[in-house]
Amino acid sequence: MSADTTPQTKGATTSAPASLTGRLRLIGPGIVLALASVGASDMITTMNSGAEYGLALIWVFTVGILLKFVLSEAVSRLQMSGDRSLLSHLTSFGGRLFPALFLIAELLVGLFFGAGVIAVTTNILQALFPVLPFWPTAVVVLLSAAILVGIGRYGLVEKAMIGFGIIMFFGIVALAISVLQGQEAQAVAVETMAPTFPNGSIITVMSLIGGVGGATGILAYSYWIREKSWRDAEWKPVVRIDLFISYALVFVFAVAMSAVGAFILYGQGFTIADNDSLFAIADSLVSRIGEVGRIVFLISFLAVVYTSVLGGFSGIAYVTADCIRVLRRYPHQDKLEHEMSAKSVEFRAAIVYLSIATLVIMGLGKPVTLVLIYAAISAFILPVLAIALLVILNRSSVPAALRNKEVSNVLLTICFLLFGFLAVLQVKESVMGLLG
């Protein structure tokens, strides 16, 4: 095989391919990031946008996707600036502070993440196969994800997610095209194509910008590219192509779901309030495009949610395990005997924690107080990350090819201000919920 198509071994490292074809053959972590970053809540957000504004707010999702591309690209440059894990890099700005903060955030995210996505995945399977009982099915779904991720082989998770991603991609695109048929849908497309500003509300716009794509996935991307041995500056072109494809897929998802919401619900005053409403949408498709449309929607929905289970478990486990590793070993965490590994005790303990938390929270429901605290703390992941990237990636110790340029600094500053504002709004909402 040529160097243009596969990475070549140099001792314990690999060299990046020089050709576009060779780089494209290596993509994978970006697809995992895309699939991990979108879930049921993003389907609700985008379809509600289509139901209320038609196609007029696609520009808002585009801005949000671009900003998250900026953060992910900066995270990858930090990862490639030295053969250390992300949290180890962040100790150069604040010592144990960032590992401690992110550990608290990830433990809270993990407490509630699994319960929501496992329950929804089970509900979709029941909609497809009504004879399935809830709890046994939920346990099987949970165990399948925990075992697949807990084996500790990133490549296995990547292959599984790419398979589900193909189903999701073709399903949602086919669905969007099918609901476009007919003069009424085409009239909605023409009427709402022009970008607009929703009700003059800056808060609505900013919330939608922050609404598609997850914070943990951005953190976890650094671990996924590390598993691929993309560990120095020569891999930057590969990473950028990988991320471009990642966020292109997120964009297609957002546009397709907005289109489905617009062509089915626009002008009806109907809002999708929860996951049950999504099942009602599936049922409504029968009268429009037949039973096949309902099945395609549910299978696409299943792919969206189950890939978010796999990606979420993988991402949370990597970040949590690395936080624990760094806090335990600091400042010697980079010694060879303390290497970050998906087969480590910390990683597998995080999977066990996720599994137990899922079953407990599913059994008890989601305690309102803990949910509000979790939402408030996790909202600060992106602004905190943005300020850290602004500081560290401007240092002379970072290789010149990986340092921030002026454009990067401007965009990261915008990320910090935007996501910081959204975090403040989330804290305000959480405090009001606790007091009310």
Image: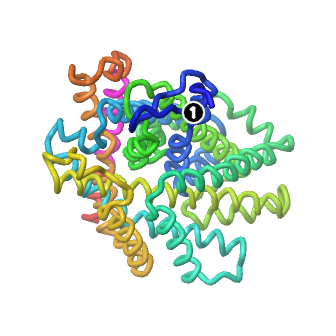
Quarter holding the N terminus?
top right
State whether the magenta stretch is mostly helix, strand or loop. helix
Q: Residue at x 51, y 61 (%)?
A: 309
* Image position, residue 163 (x, y; %): 65, 53
Q: Where is mark 1, residue-wise?
A: 6
Instruction: Tell which of 427 and 11 is nearer to you.
Output: 11
In which image quadrant can residue 262 be found? top right
* Image position, residue 101 (x, y; %): 22, 51
Above-or-below relation of 99 to 301: above
Q: Is residue 416 left or right of residue 271?
A: left
* Image position, residue 297 (x, y; %): 72, 58
Above-or-below relation of 233 to 169: above
Residue 74 seen anywhere in this rendered image of the structure: yes
Above-or-below relation of 56 to 161: above
Q: Residue at x 14, y 49 (%)?
A: 330
Above-or-below relation of 380 to 118: above
> Amino acid under label 1?
Thr
The stretch drawn in magenta includes residue 103: no
Residue 428 seen anywhere in this rendered image of the structure: no
In which image quadrant can residue 307 be found? bottom right
Q: Kindly state the secondary structure of the residue where label 1 is placed.
A: loop
User: Which stretch did the figure color magenta?
Assistant: 409-426
Quarter holding the C terminus?
bottom left
Q: Is residue 272 left or right of residue 373?
A: right
User: How packed is label 1: few (under 14 Cα within 10 Å), some, or many (20 or more)?
Assistant: some
Instruction: Tell which of 380 and 215 is nearer to you.
Output: 215
